[in-house]
Amino acid sequence: MDVKYVANLAKIKLTPEEADKLQLQLDNILSFFKDLENLNTENIEPLSHVLDVKNVFRDDNPKVSISKEEILDLAPEKNDDFIKVPKVIG
């Protein structure tokens, strides 16, 4: 019943066979989480990530960029110092 309810909320049409298959998969996933609840994690330190990940940043090397005038010259339409684009919100 959970799969049909969620499918209805998401406006997804499922055949009865698809709903049964997804319900079985969902039951298996929830069963796995119940198995995890039984693990002894008393001496396990909480992690924010399973791997030892460090931020990797490249050096910030400023470079000369294209000028405003060059950008405006490339624009198909412009209005003063602005690029004119089609209206997308009514």
Image (cartoon, rainbow, N blue to C red):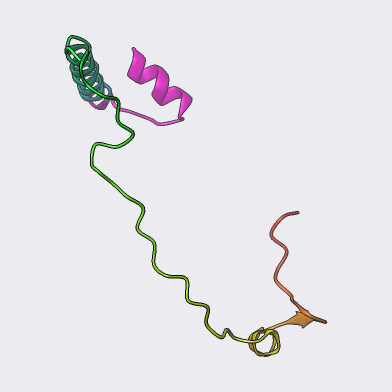
x then y, percent, for residue 51: 23, 41
Q: For this rendering, which residue is in front, 30 or 76? A: 30
**Left or right of residue 40, residue 76 in this image:** right
Magenta highlight on residue 68: no
Picture layout, residue 33 above or below residue 48 = above
Q: Quadrant of residue 35?
A: top left
Q: For this rendering, which residue is in front, 76 or 19? A: 76
Q: Quadrant of residue 70?
A: bottom right
Taking the spot 34% from the left edge, 20% from the top edge, the residue there is 3
x then y, percent, for residue 23: 25, 19
Picture layout, residue 63 above or below residue 44 = below
x then y, percent, for residue 12: 40, 31
Q: Looking at the rendering, in which quadrant would you find the N terminus?
A: top left
x then y, percent, for residue 50: 24, 36
> What range of the chain is rendered magenta?
1-18
Q: For this rendering, which residue is in front, 61 or 65? A: 61
Hey, which residue is sitting farthest right in the picture?
80
Taking the spot 36% from the left edge, 19% from the top edge, the residue there is 4
Our reading of the magenta stretch's main secondary structure is: helix
Taking the spot 24% from the left edge, 43% from the top edge, the residue there is 52
